[in-house]
Amino acid sequence: MKINVNVNSAAGLLDQFYEKQRLLIISAPDPSNRYYKMQISMLQNEGNTVGASTLGMTEGTGCCRPHSMIQSTCGLDLRHVTIIELVGQPPQEVGRIREQQLSANIIEELRQFQHLTRSYFNMVLIDKQGIDRDRYMKPVTPEEIFTFIDDYLLSNQELTQRQEQRDICE
């Protein structure tokens, strides 16, 4: 799915995902936050389960650079989940979807719209209709996220697709 981050509002950004993708928005006060690092590590270590990017600080510059995470058909991709990361404090706050940077205005609107604080780690899982389905104040395993999606959010078509992929993914 091609994502246009050069939109005028968070609503314009979120509209691109409506009825197509679920969102997992990860928010942290800074890239060194232990919960943020733990969550990203769990998603990376799941091995072949995520298609997103993490944020990392370039030493001495105060700006962020992407670290690619592994692409896959089994984990979040199979469940149509896109990760949005909102990390840091203004003016060095960074928002990212995969390798694409979000503007400061979009970051602020997403935080306000989804009630995501900069003060501590928090995550929200949003369904394909744009509804906030689960919130996390601490890191969770990929399996917990997958189970929640599989049990409560998959359509019949997605469930069938998931069952067809079971041999490949397990």
Image: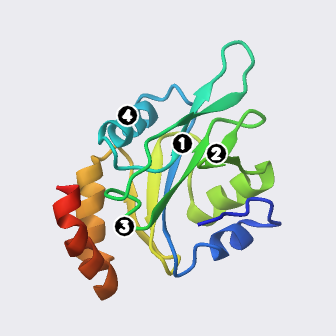
Task: Identify the mark nearer the N-term, 1 or 4.
Answer: 4
Residue closer to the observer: 170 or 26: 170
Determine contact: label 3, label 4, CB under 8 Å.
Answer: no
Label 4 belongs to which residue? Answer: 41
Residue closer to the observer: 35 or 4: 4
Separation of residues labelled 3 and 1 (CA atoms): 17 Å
Quadrant of the rendered image containing residue 168: bottom left
Q: Residue at x 35, y 44 (%)?
A: 138
Determine contact: label 2, label 1, CB under 8 Å.
Answer: yes
Q: Is residue 137 above or below residue 158?
A: above
Residue closer to the observer: 92 or 96: 96
Q: Residue 99: which numbered mark, if any?
A: 2
Separation of residues labelled 3 and 4 (CA atoms): 20 Å
Three-letter code, disc 3: Arg
- x, y percent for residue 91: 78, 35
Quadrant of the rendered image containing residue 34: top left
Q: Residue at x 47, y 40 (%)?
A: 69
On the rendered image, what quadrant is the C terminus found in? bottom left
Label 3 belongs to which residue? Answer: 79
Three-letter code, disc 2: Glu
Element class at badge 2? loop
Query: Around disc 3, counting alpha carbons within 10 Å, would you say few (fewer than 14), some (14 to 19), or many (20 or more)?
Result: many
